[in-house]
Amino acid sequence: MKRTLFILSLLVGFGLVHAQERKLPVDTVVTTQHSVTINGSPLNYTAKTGTQPVWDESGKPMAALHYTYYTKNNVKDRASRPLLISFNGGPGSASVWMHLAYTGPRMLKIDDEGYPVQPYGVKENPYSVLDVTDIVYVNPANTGYSRTIPETGKEVNRDTFFGINADIKYLAEWLNTFVTRNNRWRSPKYIIGESYGGTRVMGLSLALQNQQWMYLNGVIMVSPADYKVIRKGGPVSDAISLPYFTATAWHHKKLPAALQQKDLLEILPETEEFTLNTLIPALSKGGFIDSAEKNAVAKKMAYYSGLSEKEILDQNLVVSTRYFWKHLLQDEGYTTGRLDSRYLGIDRQMFGGRPDYNAEISSWSHSFTPAINYYLQEELNFKTDIKYNMFGPVRPWNNENDNTRENLRQAMAQNPFLNVLIQSGYYDGATTYFNAKYTMWQVDPSGRMKDRFEFKGYRSGHMMYLRKEDLQQANEDIRVFIKRTMSNGKSAKY
């Protein structure tokens, strides 16, 4: 055996035998059969995982996108069965998080609050929405196993893939091919995106209609990132995190007794009202605000945030989320997590304006990375030496000309069937729940379509589905939303 390996290595060295390239097939699929019990009922399903090309204008592949597609078996009328198209965010994040922890038929091994458990692996997801909809999880270019062609080098036109509008354009085209190949044109279609995926699906809602003539029944945004607020700055951007501060301070028992003794959902309307009607107008006055008003606002901000009046006044009423994560639990020696502020971290020193690291990401990477690698290779039988990019090389990312909020409004105006569900965790400090509410309010200035929007909040963070109680409820909310928004023979008209 050793002699054979030695001879083979010599042949490879002399170029007489070529070693296998670490390269992903551009167009391939592996099919496996499985079963799961959802809400007490057994369900048999087919899993297809593989790659499908992104073509350039001359018909040559310029990327291979990896996907996993689940269909319920023994469905007599596939045309009437919905299809849920799932993306995560980043940009640059693989579609692993919702795949293995939220809507899919398998979920990673975690405890009831979402913390990793060894040995790593997966188990059945008894709350998956596969009972009511087929699901496809899509990995955009350079995330998961997806790759541009060529993978590196000057030949790759990064403007084709790595920007808000480029991302929307090529993914819409890719979805056209996927729907055609899998005979899903007649099916009711839903698209779900988490975090930056919220931006992505707002844009895709119109791109699918106007570029691919594909009309959706629903857009689901999970902890959506709205860069019209996050990166813009100003009074709204500076004020809108306060209700999140209240929720996190309540969780860590840092609020005054008058608030702490109430339930979270009793106090959030108070802090929301203060933010909209007092804090935003006060910040709009900038340095010209009256000192008495400034002190009164600081006192109320302290009441709702768990921080001191002095801290707030020292920052002229503008408290960043980074400062909040660093200082809320300073006296106890901890920082709080960014994406889920229930998580605690330990910094080198308590002085400073931001935490050393994101406590929640370290915890999540413990369980997700080994689970997805095991699951795809061992249970779905997709064998490859390509590294699975949990976070892929997609930067610099072009954020210019972000019209996605208006894209969603236009798509809804043109399509009477299109409804929107927004899901957020109260302890998410990256894309806060109140920011998501504000986005919802701003999509349709006329208010004519507000009855087609729905907001759901959960007592957890960015990936609210990691907490068992929220996993069950959030999936049920999607299940109800899909059933409610299927047209069932109704005409598409106002």
Image (cartoon, rainbow, N blue to C red):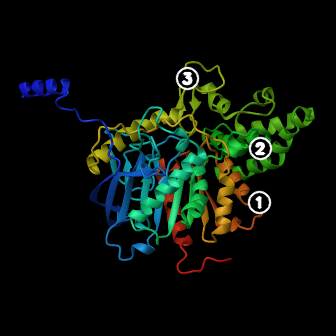
Which image quarter: residue 124?
bottom left
Instruction: Measuring from the top left, give residue 463's x and y in whole percent.
Output: 52, 46
Could you tell whether 18 is left or right of 28 in the image? left
**Which sits in the foreground, 338 or 87?**
87
Point out the tag, 3 or 1, that comes first from the N-terminus: 3
Query: What amino acid does circle 3 point to?
Result: Asp
Q: Secondary structure at mark 1?
A: loop
Query: What amino acid does circle 2 point to?
Result: Val
Point out the tag, 3 or 2, that comes first from the N-terminus: 2
Q: Nearer the viewer, mark 2 or mark 1?
A: 1
- Residue labelled with disc 3: 347
Q: Which label belongs to residue 454?
A: none
Q: Secondary structure at mark 3?
A: loop
Q: Nearer the viewer, mark 3 or mark 1?
A: 1
Looking at the image, is 337 positioned above or below residue 2?
below
Q: Identify the residue shown where x is 68% and y is 77%.
A: 494
- Residue labelled with disc 2: 236
Instruction: Measuring from the top left, give residue 410's x and y in whole percent.
Output: 68, 62
- Residue labelled with disc 1: 445
Q: Is residue 164 visible?
A: yes
Q: Identify the residue shown where x is 65% and y is 28%.
A: 327
